[in-house]
Image (cartoon, rainbow, N blue to C red):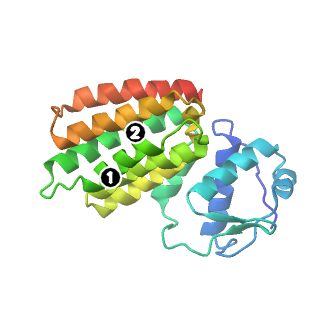
């Protein structure tokens, strides 16, 4: 398959434009589940771009389950689309994922919504969140890779999603976290493990009712934490 870009949009990153090309080919039927994609080198040649944005686009597409990489064989559009639907919301989020500051800003307000839903819910069950947090205290060690630490970090946030008992929130939240995941490079600094665990403890204390839930206070705490994440990203 030959891809083409008629005119590069200077207001968007090259990687997001590559993701958009894959999206358009999926939506118009040119690409179907199980189809093999060109190699990195072939994409570079066909699009006239360097290896870096191609790899960034592949990382995003793999993270959200659009493509599957088979060692020794190549890249394929996944056959398992049960958890991935080609809807405008998901692709809109993908297209804006290059703006990390705005994505983190949205995430912090979204997480305030999650906590408020759990606190005011009729059936508050924190057992899943408690279990994950206790596990993180034992498992998050500096010897682990940034990718492994990011996976463990996200387990907590997935548990919070599930505790809302709201399928709409769960699906939107999973999409947000999967888009953020490739950029969770703050774990390259082992000292940030302590910051992550401290933040999770703060969330848990609020959910337990051991601290007053004040949305402005919570957002202020998150802003400080996420500003440090942005600095690490930049």
Q: Nearer the viewer, residue 125 or 5?
A: 125
Query: Which residue sits at x=82%, y=60%?
Result: 39
| Badge number at residue 131 | 1
Q: Quadrant of residue 52?
A: top right
- Where residue 79 appears, as percent x and y from the top left, is 61, 75
Q: CA distance from mark 1 to mark 2?
A: 27 Å
Q: Earlier in the sequence, mark 1 or mark 2?
A: 2
The N terminus: image quadrant: bottom right
Q: Are marks 1 and 2 in contact (CB under 8 Å)?
A: no
Q: Secondary structure at mark 2?
A: helix
Q: Which residue is situated farthest in the left direction here?
A: 122
Q: Which residue is situated farthest in the front direction here?
A: 138
Query: Which residue sits at x=68%, y=36%?
Result: 10
Question: Quick check: 115 left or right of 13?
Answer: left
Is residue 117 shown to the viewer in this render?
yes
| Badge number at residue 16 | none
Query: Which residue sits at x=60%, y=63%?
Result: 66
Residue that badge 2 annotates: 106
Q: Nearer the viewer, residue 31 or 74?
A: 74
Marker count (numbered): 2
Query: Which residue sits at x=30%, y=30%?
Result: 219
Question: Quick check: 129 left or right of 96?
Answer: left
């Amino acid at each position: 398959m030959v891809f083409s870009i008629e005119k590069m949009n200077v207001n968007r990153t090259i990687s997001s434009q590559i993701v958009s090309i894959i999206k358009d080919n999926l939506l118009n039927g040119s690409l179907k589940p199980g189809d093999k994609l060109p190699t990195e080198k072939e994409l570079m040649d066909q699009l006239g771009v360097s290896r870096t944005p191609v790899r960034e686009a592949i990382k995003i597409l793999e993270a959200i389950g659009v493509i599957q990489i088979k060692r020794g064989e190549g890249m394929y559009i996944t056959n398992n689309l049960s958890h991935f639907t080609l809807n405008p919301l998901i692709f809109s989020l993908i297209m804006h994922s290059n703006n990390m500051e705005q994505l983190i800003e949205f995430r912090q307000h979204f997480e305030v919504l999650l906590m408020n839903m759990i606190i005011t819910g009729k059936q508050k069950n924190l057992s899943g969140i408690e279990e994950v947090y206790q596990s993180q205290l034992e498992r998050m060690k500096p010897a682990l890779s940034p990718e492994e630490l990011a996976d463990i970090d996200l387990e907590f946030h997935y548990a919070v999603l599930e505790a809302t008992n709201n399928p709409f929130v769960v699906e939107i939240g999973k999409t947000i976290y999967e888009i953020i995941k490739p950029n969770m490079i703050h774990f390259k600094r082992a000292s940030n493990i302590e910051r992550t665990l401290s933040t999770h403890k703060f969330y848990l204390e609020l959910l337990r009712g051991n601290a007053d839930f004040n949305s402005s206070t919570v957002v202020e705490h998150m802003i400080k934490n996420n500003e440090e994440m942005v600095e690490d990203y930049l």
